[in-house]
Image (spheres, rainbow, N blue to C red):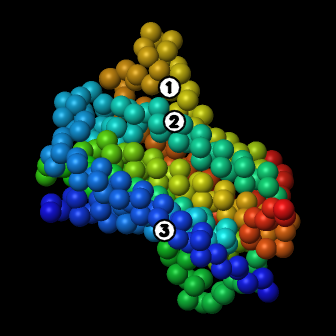
Amino acid sequence: MMAPERFRPLAGVLAALLVTGVGGMLVWALRSLPPEASGLSAQVRERLPESGVRAEVTAVLLNFRGYDTLLEMAVLLAALLGAWHLGPLRLSRGEVSRGPVMESLVRFLVPAMVLVTGYVLWRGSHAAGGAFQAGALLAGAGVLLLVVRPDALALRDRQGLRVLLVAGPALFALVAGSVLFAGRALLEYPPEHSGSLILLIEAASTLSIGITLTLLFAGGRPRRGGGG
Amino acid sequence: MSQYLWYALVGTGLFSIGLLGLILQRHLLRRVLALNVMGTGVFLIFVALARRAGTLPDPVPHAMVLTGLVVSVSATALGLVLIGRVQRLHGRPELPEDES
Protein backbone atom coordinates (compact mmCIF):
# COMPACT_ATOMS: atom_id res chain seq x y z
CA MET A 1 0.00 0.00 0.00
CA MET A 2 1.44 3.32 -1.00
CA ALA A 3 1.48 6.23 1.37
CA PRO A 4 -1.29 8.73 0.60
CA GLU A 5 -0.06 11.69 -1.39
CA ARG A 6 0.28 14.92 0.46
CA PHE A 7 -2.15 17.47 -0.91
CA ARG A 8 -0.24 20.53 -1.95
CA PRO A 9 -2.67 23.26 -3.01
CA LEU A 10 0.05 25.84 -3.64
CA ALA A 11 1.87 23.51 -6.06
CA GLY A 12 -1.39 22.84 -7.86
CA VAL A 13 -2.20 26.52 -8.28
CA LEU A 14 1.34 27.35 -9.45
CA ALA A 15 1.32 24.48 -11.95
CA ALA A 16 -2.08 25.53 -13.27
CA LEU A 17 -0.84 29.11 -13.71
CA LEU A 18 2.32 27.94 -15.50
CA VAL A 19 0.38 25.62 -17.82
CA THR A 20 -2.18 28.32 -18.58
CA GLY A 21 0.65 30.70 -19.43
CA VAL A 22 2.44 28.22 -21.70
CA GLY A 23 -0.83 27.18 -23.35
CA GLY A 24 -1.82 30.81 -23.85
CA MET A 25 1.50 31.61 -25.51
CA LEU A 26 1.11 28.60 -27.81
CA VAL A 27 -2.41 29.66 -28.80
CA TRP A 28 -1.17 33.20 -29.45
CA ALA A 29 1.73 31.87 -31.55
CA LEU A 30 -0.54 29.57 -33.56
CA ARG A 31 -3.09 32.30 -34.21
CA SER A 32 -0.41 34.71 -35.42
CA LEU A 33 0.80 32.25 -38.11
CA PRO A 34 -0.21 33.05 -41.69
CA PRO A 35 -3.22 30.93 -42.68
CA GLU A 36 -1.58 29.83 -45.90
CA ALA A 37 2.02 28.70 -46.08
CA SER A 38 3.36 26.16 -48.50
CA GLY A 39 6.41 25.48 -46.33
CA LEU A 40 8.92 23.39 -48.25
CA SER A 41 6.38 21.46 -50.30
CA ALA A 42 7.21 23.37 -53.51
CA GLN A 43 10.91 22.52 -53.18
CA VAL A 44 10.12 18.88 -52.40
CA ARG A 45 7.83 18.56 -55.43
CA GLU A 46 10.37 20.25 -57.69
CA ARG A 47 13.19 17.87 -56.73
CA LEU A 48 11.04 14.75 -56.34
CA PRO A 49 12.11 13.23 -59.70
CA GLU A 50 15.73 13.24 -58.49
CA SER A 51 14.97 11.46 -55.22
CA GLY A 52 14.49 7.99 -56.69
CA VAL A 53 11.02 7.51 -55.19
CA ARG A 54 7.62 8.91 -56.07
CA ALA A 55 6.26 9.29 -52.52
CA GLU A 56 6.97 12.71 -51.04
CA VAL A 57 7.23 11.64 -47.40
CA THR A 58 9.59 8.77 -48.26
CA ALA A 59 11.69 11.15 -50.37
CA VAL A 60 11.98 13.57 -47.44
CA LEU A 61 12.72 10.81 -44.91
CA LEU A 62 15.25 8.77 -46.86
CA ASN A 63 16.78 11.33 -49.19
CA PHE A 64 16.28 15.05 -48.51
CA ARG A 65 16.38 14.72 -44.72
CA GLY A 66 18.21 11.40 -44.59
CA TYR A 67 20.42 12.66 -41.80
CA ASP A 68 17.45 12.83 -39.40
CA THR A 69 16.42 9.30 -40.26
CA LEU A 70 19.94 7.96 -39.87
CA LEU A 71 20.19 9.49 -36.38
CA GLU A 72 16.70 8.23 -35.59
CA MET A 73 17.84 4.65 -36.26
CA ALA A 74 20.74 5.34 -33.88
CA VAL A 75 18.27 6.59 -31.23
CA LEU A 76 16.27 3.37 -31.52
CA LEU A 77 19.39 1.27 -31.09
CA ALA A 78 20.58 3.42 -28.18
CA ALA A 79 17.22 3.01 -26.41
CA LEU A 80 17.46 -0.76 -26.76
CA LEU A 81 21.05 -0.79 -25.49
CA GLY A 82 19.94 1.30 -22.52
CA ALA A 83 17.10 -1.10 -21.75
CA TRP A 84 19.43 -4.10 -22.04
CA HIS A 85 21.88 -2.59 -19.58
CA LEU A 86 19.21 -2.19 -16.91
CA GLY A 87 18.65 -5.85 -16.34
CA PRO A 88 17.80 -9.25 -17.78
CA LEU A 89 14.60 -10.10 -19.59
CA ARG A 90 11.72 -11.22 -17.37
CA LEU A 91 8.83 -12.75 -19.22
CA SER A 92 5.78 -13.22 -17.04
CA ARG A 93 4.47 -16.52 -18.31
CA GLY A 94 1.83 -16.82 -15.61
CA GLU A 95 -0.34 -14.00 -16.91
CA VAL A 96 -0.69 -15.33 -20.44
CA SER A 97 -4.29 -16.26 -21.10
CA ARG A 98 -3.96 -18.85 -23.81
CA GLY A 99 -7.01 -20.36 -25.41
CA PRO A 100 -7.76 -22.17 -28.64
CA VAL A 101 -9.19 -18.98 -30.16
CA MET A 102 -6.09 -16.93 -29.29
CA GLU A 103 -3.76 -19.67 -30.54
CA SER A 104 -5.42 -20.05 -33.92
CA LEU A 105 -5.88 -16.29 -34.28
CA VAL A 106 -2.17 -15.72 -33.76
CA ARG A 107 -1.34 -18.58 -36.12
CA PHE A 108 -3.41 -16.81 -38.76
CA LEU A 109 -2.53 -13.21 -37.92
CA VAL A 110 1.25 -13.30 -37.62
CA PRO A 111 1.97 -14.57 -41.17
CA ALA A 112 -0.60 -12.11 -42.52
CA MET A 113 1.09 -9.25 -40.67
CA VAL A 114 4.48 -10.26 -42.03
CA LEU A 115 3.00 -10.29 -45.53
CA VAL A 116 1.47 -6.83 -45.04
CA THR A 117 4.85 -5.63 -43.72
CA GLY A 118 6.42 -6.51 -47.05
CA TYR A 119 3.62 -4.80 -48.96
CA VAL A 120 3.77 -1.59 -46.90
CA LEU A 121 7.56 -1.49 -47.31
CA TRP A 122 7.29 -1.79 -51.10
CA ARG A 123 4.40 0.66 -51.25
CA GLY A 124 6.57 3.33 -49.57
CA SER A 125 8.31 4.00 -52.88
CA HIS A 126 5.21 5.51 -54.50
CA ALA A 127 2.53 6.14 -51.83
CA ALA A 128 1.99 6.32 -48.08
CA GLY A 129 4.08 3.58 -46.46
CA GLY A 130 7.73 2.86 -45.91
CA ALA A 131 10.23 1.46 -43.46
CA PHE A 132 8.77 2.89 -40.27
CA GLN A 133 5.19 1.86 -40.94
CA ALA A 134 6.35 -1.59 -42.05
CA GLY A 135 8.66 -1.89 -39.05
CA ALA A 136 5.81 -1.01 -36.70
CA LEU A 137 3.67 -3.75 -38.28
CA LEU A 138 6.48 -6.26 -37.91
CA ALA A 139 6.85 -5.20 -34.28
CA GLY A 140 3.10 -5.73 -33.83
CA ALA A 141 3.48 -9.30 -35.04
CA GLY A 142 6.49 -9.78 -32.77
CA VAL A 143 4.68 -8.40 -29.71
CA LEU A 144 1.68 -10.64 -30.44
CA LEU A 145 3.96 -13.67 -30.55
CA LEU A 146 5.75 -12.52 -27.43
CA VAL A 147 2.50 -12.17 -25.48
CA VAL A 148 0.86 -15.40 -26.60
CA ARG A 149 3.74 -17.75 -27.37
CA PRO A 150 6.92 -16.53 -25.62
CA ASP A 151 8.36 -20.02 -26.05
CA ALA A 152 7.84 -19.94 -29.83
CA LEU A 153 9.93 -16.82 -30.17
CA ALA A 154 12.69 -18.31 -27.96
CA LEU A 155 14.38 -14.98 -27.32
CA ARG A 156 18.09 -15.45 -26.96
CA ASP A 157 20.90 -12.94 -27.30
CA ARG A 158 22.42 -14.60 -30.34
CA GLN A 159 24.96 -13.32 -32.85
CA GLY A 160 22.31 -13.39 -35.56
CA LEU A 161 19.90 -11.28 -33.52
CA ARG A 162 22.56 -8.63 -33.01
CA VAL A 163 23.34 -8.57 -36.72
CA LEU A 164 19.64 -7.98 -37.48
CA LEU A 165 19.44 -5.23 -34.85
CA VAL A 166 22.28 -3.20 -36.35
CA ALA A 167 21.56 -4.10 -40.00
CA GLY A 168 19.37 -1.03 -40.58
CA PRO A 169 21.54 1.70 -39.04
CA ALA A 170 24.77 0.05 -40.23
CA LEU A 171 23.66 -0.30 -43.85
CA PHE A 172 22.27 3.24 -43.80
CA ALA A 173 25.55 4.61 -42.42
CA LEU A 174 27.53 2.53 -44.93
CA VAL A 175 25.56 3.87 -47.91
CA ALA A 176 25.63 7.41 -46.46
CA GLY A 177 29.39 7.26 -46.03
CA SER A 178 30.42 5.37 -49.15
CA VAL A 179 29.06 8.07 -51.48
CA LEU A 180 31.79 10.29 -50.02
CA PHE A 181 34.36 8.23 -51.95
CA ALA A 182 32.57 9.09 -55.20
CA GLY A 183 33.17 12.77 -54.47
CA ARG A 184 29.64 13.42 -53.28
CA ALA A 185 28.36 14.90 -50.02
CA LEU A 186 27.27 12.70 -47.12
CA LEU A 187 23.97 10.98 -47.98
CA GLU A 188 23.99 12.37 -51.54
CA TYR A 189 23.01 9.22 -53.42
CA PRO A 190 23.86 8.97 -57.11
CA PRO A 191 20.50 9.80 -58.76
CA GLU A 192 20.52 6.80 -61.10
CA HIS A 193 20.79 4.35 -58.18
CA SER A 194 18.93 6.28 -55.48
CA GLY A 195 15.70 4.29 -55.90
CA SER A 196 17.31 0.91 -55.31
CA LEU A 197 19.58 2.29 -52.56
CA ILE A 198 16.55 3.68 -50.72
CA LEU A 199 14.70 0.36 -51.03
CA LEU A 200 17.77 -1.51 -49.74
CA ILE A 201 18.11 0.83 -46.73
CA GLU A 202 14.39 0.64 -46.06
CA ALA A 203 14.33 -3.17 -46.19
CA ALA A 204 17.18 -3.47 -43.69
CA SER A 205 15.67 -0.73 -41.53
CA THR A 206 12.27 -2.44 -41.48
CA LEU A 207 13.83 -5.60 -40.04
CA SER A 208 15.87 -3.64 -37.49
CA ILE A 209 12.95 -1.42 -36.44
CA GLY A 210 10.57 -4.37 -36.07
CA ILE A 211 12.97 -6.44 -34.01
CA THR A 212 14.17 -3.48 -31.92
CA LEU A 213 10.60 -2.46 -31.04
CA THR A 214 9.67 -6.06 -30.16
CA LEU A 215 12.71 -6.32 -27.88
CA LEU A 216 11.95 -2.93 -26.33
CA PHE A 217 8.48 -4.26 -25.53
CA ALA A 218 10.06 -7.33 -23.92
CA GLY A 219 12.11 -4.95 -21.77
CA GLY A 220 15.36 -6.45 -20.56
CA ARG A 221 18.23 -8.23 -22.17
CA PRO A 222 17.56 -11.81 -23.29
CA ARG A 223 19.80 -14.58 -22.03
CA ARG A 224 22.79 -15.42 -24.13
CA GLY A 225 22.17 -18.28 -26.48
CA GLY A 226 24.21 -20.33 -28.91
CA GLY A 227 25.53 -18.93 -32.17
CA GLY A 228 23.58 -18.87 -35.42
CA MET B 1 -11.85 29.78 -37.72
CA SER B 2 -10.15 27.64 -40.31
CA GLN B 3 -9.99 23.89 -39.92
CA TYR B 4 -6.22 23.60 -39.52
CA LEU B 5 -6.25 26.12 -36.66
CA TRP B 6 -8.93 24.15 -34.85
CA TYR B 7 -6.82 20.98 -34.98
CA ALA B 8 -3.70 22.91 -33.92
CA LEU B 9 -5.56 24.36 -30.93
CA VAL B 10 -6.71 20.85 -29.93
CA GLY B 11 -3.01 19.89 -30.08
CA THR B 12 -2.21 22.83 -27.78
CA GLY B 13 -4.86 21.58 -25.36
CA LEU B 14 -3.34 18.09 -25.35
CA PHE B 15 0.11 19.57 -24.79
CA SER B 16 -1.14 21.63 -21.82
CA ILE B 17 -2.96 18.68 -20.23
CA GLY B 18 0.19 16.60 -20.58
CA LEU B 19 2.35 19.36 -19.09
CA LEU B 20 0.04 19.69 -16.09
CA GLY B 21 0.14 15.93 -15.55
CA LEU B 22 3.91 15.87 -15.85
CA ILE B 23 4.25 18.51 -13.11
CA LEU B 24 1.57 17.29 -10.71
CA GLN B 25 1.66 13.49 -10.92
CA ARG B 26 4.15 11.66 -8.76
CA HIS B 27 3.66 8.14 -10.08
CA LEU B 28 6.35 7.68 -12.74
CA LEU B 29 4.10 5.70 -15.07
CA ARG B 30 1.67 8.61 -15.09
CA ARG B 31 4.52 10.98 -15.84
CA VAL B 32 5.60 8.91 -18.83
CA LEU B 33 1.99 8.84 -20.02
CA ALA B 34 1.81 12.63 -19.54
CA LEU B 35 4.94 13.03 -21.69
CA ASN B 36 3.25 10.91 -24.37
CA VAL B 37 0.13 13.09 -24.25
CA MET B 38 2.36 16.16 -24.68
CA GLY B 39 4.10 14.52 -27.63
CA THR B 40 0.78 13.65 -29.25
CA GLY B 41 -0.22 17.29 -28.94
CA VAL B 42 2.97 18.42 -30.68
CA PHE B 43 2.45 15.89 -33.50
CA LEU B 44 -1.13 17.07 -33.96
CA ILE B 45 0.04 20.71 -34.20
CA PHE B 46 2.67 19.74 -36.81
CA VAL B 47 0.27 17.76 -38.97
CA ALA B 48 -2.35 20.51 -38.66
CA LEU B 49 0.11 23.21 -39.74
CA ALA B 50 1.23 21.08 -42.71
CA ARG B 51 -2.33 21.41 -43.99
CA ARG B 52 -1.79 25.12 -44.65
CA ALA B 53 0.03 24.21 -47.88
CA GLY B 54 -3.29 23.59 -49.64
CA THR B 55 -5.08 20.46 -50.80
CA LEU B 56 -1.87 18.41 -50.69
CA PRO B 57 -0.21 18.81 -47.28
CA ASP B 58 3.43 19.78 -46.84
CA PRO B 59 5.41 16.49 -46.67
CA VAL B 60 8.25 17.85 -44.51
CA PRO B 61 6.28 18.15 -41.23
CA HIS B 62 4.76 14.72 -41.95
CA ALA B 63 8.23 13.21 -42.21
CA MET B 64 9.26 15.01 -39.01
CA VAL B 65 6.24 13.60 -37.17
CA LEU B 66 7.12 10.10 -38.40
CA THR B 67 10.63 10.58 -37.03
CA GLY B 68 9.23 11.98 -33.79
CA LEU B 69 6.89 9.03 -33.33
CA VAL B 70 9.75 6.55 -33.43
CA VAL B 71 11.85 8.61 -31.04
CA SER B 72 8.86 8.96 -28.70
CA VAL B 73 8.24 5.19 -28.74
CA SER B 74 11.91 4.51 -27.95
CA ALA B 75 11.95 7.08 -25.16
CA THR B 76 8.75 5.64 -23.68
CA ALA B 77 10.11 2.10 -23.76
CA LEU B 78 13.37 3.14 -22.10
CA GLY B 79 11.37 5.13 -19.54
CA LEU B 80 9.22 2.11 -18.71
CA VAL B 81 12.29 -0.08 -18.20
CA LEU B 82 13.76 2.64 -15.94
CA ILE B 83 10.50 2.74 -13.95
CA GLY B 84 10.76 -1.02 -13.43
CA ARG B 85 14.29 -0.48 -12.14
CA VAL B 86 13.18 2.28 -9.72
CA GLN B 87 10.35 0.04 -8.50
CA ARG B 88 12.80 -2.77 -7.72
CA LEU B 89 15.26 -0.44 -5.97
CA HIS B 90 12.86 1.68 -3.90
CA GLY B 91 9.82 -0.54 -3.65
CA ARG B 92 7.54 1.97 -5.32
CA PRO B 93 7.34 3.65 -8.72
CA GLU B 94 8.16 7.16 -7.50
CA LEU B 95 11.33 9.14 -7.31
CA PRO B 96 12.50 9.32 -3.68
CA GLU B 97 11.88 12.69 -2.00
CA ASP B 98 14.76 14.74 -0.70
CA GLU B 99 14.74 14.39 3.09
CA SER B 100 15.57 17.90 4.30
Q: Considering the image in quadrants, where does the N terminus of chain B appear?
A: bottom left
Total labels drawn: 3
Q: Classify 10 Å Cα crowding around label 1: few (below 14), some (14-19), many (20 and above).
A: many
Please give the residue where the numbered disc 3 appears in the rendered image.
Answer: A16
Q: Which amino acid does the dot numbered 2 rest on? A: Leu
Going 57% across and 64% down the picture, which residue do you hit? Answer: B22
Q: Considering the image in quadrants, where does the C terminus of chain B appear?
A: bottom right
Determine which quarter of the picture holds residue A90. bottom right
Q: Classify 10 Å Cα crowding around label 3: few (below 14), some (14-19), many (20 and above).
A: some
Determine which quarter of the picture holds residue A44. top left
Location of residue A121 in the rendering, given as x and y in whole percent from the top left corner: 41, 50
Q: Classify 10 Å Cα crowding around label 2: few (below 14), some (14-19), many (20 and above).
A: many
Q: Chain of mark 2?
A: A
Q: Chain of mark 1?
A: A
Tags 1 and 3 on a common chain: yes
State whether residue B99 is above or below residue A8: above
Label whose residue precedes the other's in the sequence (2 or 3): 3
Label whose residue precedes the other's in the sequence (1 or 2): 2
Location of residue A62 in the rendering, given as x and y in whole percent from the top left corner: 40, 37
Inspect this view and state whether residue A145 appears: no
Location of residue A148 in the rendering, given as x and y in whole percent from the top left corner: 64, 77
Instruction: Say left or right for A156 vs A37.
Output: right
Q: Chain of mark 3?
A: A
Please give the residue where the numbered disc 1 appears in the rendered image.
Answer: A176
Please give the residue where the numbered disc 2 appears in the rendered image.
Answer: A70
Q: Which amino acid does the dot numbered 1 rest on? A: Ala
